[in-house]
Amino acid sequence: MTYKNFIQLFCLLFLANQVKAQVIYEGTYPNGYPSIKNAFELSDSSTVSFANNSTCYFAGWRHISSTGSIIKQGGLAGESTHSLRSRQIGTNSILVSFREGPLDYPGSNYFRVVLWRPDTMTTLVLDSVHYNYWDDKSGVQYDAFLIADNHVLYQRGDTIFSKNLITGQTDFRETFFHITHVYPVLDGLMIFSAGLPPTYFNNQIEEVNTWLNIPNHPISFNDMVAMDSFIIGININMPTSLHAVNAFNENSQDIDLSAYFTLIDSLVVRGDILIASGRNGNMRYALQLDRNFDIINGTPFVAPDTIYPWVFSIYPERLYAWRIDGFSGYGADYRIAYPFLDPTPITYVDLAFEDISVDSVEYWSPPNPGAPVILKLSAYIINKSVDTLHSFTIHYQEEPSQFCDPGVYPSHFKDLNTPPGDT
């Protein structure tokens, strides 16, 4: 007879505006496909995410509606993959790049670049790679950056390629000595390498401008973002200010945000909007700036402190909060999305099992001595919080029984309206 290993409760209550909130459940045991940790928001408020090393696909994608249901999902490659990266280059356009190749024999290996849109998925680059899958897994950089003038710009190792999407030919390429960082700026690339100072190249990989005053830019080249013609980072000398450098002429400016932050943690660009997030004292805060670095909007946001940390993904209208709920890395992914400018605080509901018992037992028909016995349980749960319980999810986990079995199984209960103390 088989039995379930354990039962977990995941209880999140949106007290003020439940109809605005979005709760997405996704099981990720043992190999998540794909994680909703870092999803891209599309024009209709749906999201798409990409992940590697999944149970059902070597690399895959999942498109989720604004209400949390799966619209469509699929695979990206037929063989094992690594160096999977995704980049939003338009409101509904995602550039995905990865290396693929067989693990169990020295077969054909490729570097692939895919343009994903809600209704199509097009392979833009399929380059043969002379190394076997494992040979370059830890050392060689692969990435794709942008599409400009009917060319896709991408990186393989220390070489930058510009491929013509009409002719299918590689029109331009350039090899550098140890590329460290590449940032897409307008129709070209800002390239940082060990062989030359930071330099901006157009989409024909022609040198446009080289920075000559590096000590004048107090930013970390590891944590910058690109918006319009600027490279922007947090000022390492004044962590409440931003430092922006024009890639074309190296003119720079500092943006003092000390009136809003005591510490800036991170930057993200969403189209023409720069979002800085950090802390104002003990309060989390996010600030939106336009391409002229004028402040558009700013608001605090709240998340509970738990043993499983939250990961935030901020868009101009919504805030996505993701976390895993489980033990020692085993569990289920959850993501909560709520209006960014009018967020509902995330609070927990205190629940407890009042009683649990065996309701019935089912046997296979005809009886089979080797078949599992199915136990149906009846459980009573009491609401010990001071708030009314509207919905909750129970899930249990066990080792997957077959290929593509997630091993995490939810039961959803909605429209309960259970007051404090009720069972």
Image (tube, rainbow, N blue to C red):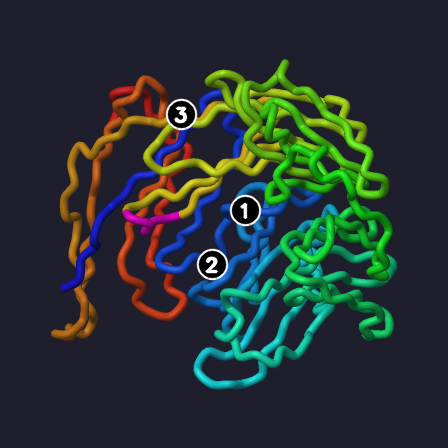
Circle 1: element type: loop
Where is residue 86 drawn, in percent x and y?
A: 62, 55
Residue 64 in picture, x, y percent from top left: 57, 49
Q: Name the residue under label 2.
A: 33
Mark nearer the viewer, 1 or 2: 1
In depth, the one of 1 and 57 nearer the eye is 57
Q: Measured from the top left, where is residue 313 in percent x and y?
A: 56, 38
Circle 2 SS class: loop
Q: Which of marks 1 and 3 is nearer the N terminus?
A: 1
Q: What stretch is highlighted in magenta?
A: 328-332
Reading the image, the residue beneath label 1 is 38
Q: What amino acid is labelled 2 in the image?
A: Tyr
Res. 249 in view: yes
| Residue shown at the point (56%, 41%) measured from the top left | 67
Horizontal side, residue 339 vs residue 24: left or right: right
Give the mark nearest the N terminus, 2 or 3.
2
Decide: marks 2, 3 in contact (CB < 8 A)? no
Find the distance from the CA under tag 1 to the CA under tag 3.
22 Å
Q: Which of marks 1 and 3 is in front?
A: 1
Q: Is residue 165 visible?
A: no
Q: Where is residue 421 in the image (x, y as percent from the top left)?
A: 25, 21
Q: Are marks 1 and 2 in contact (CB under 8 Å)?
A: no
Q: Separation of disc 1 and disc 2 at Cα?
A: 13 Å
Above or below 24: residue 81:
below
Between 276 and 78, the residue placed more toward the observer is 276
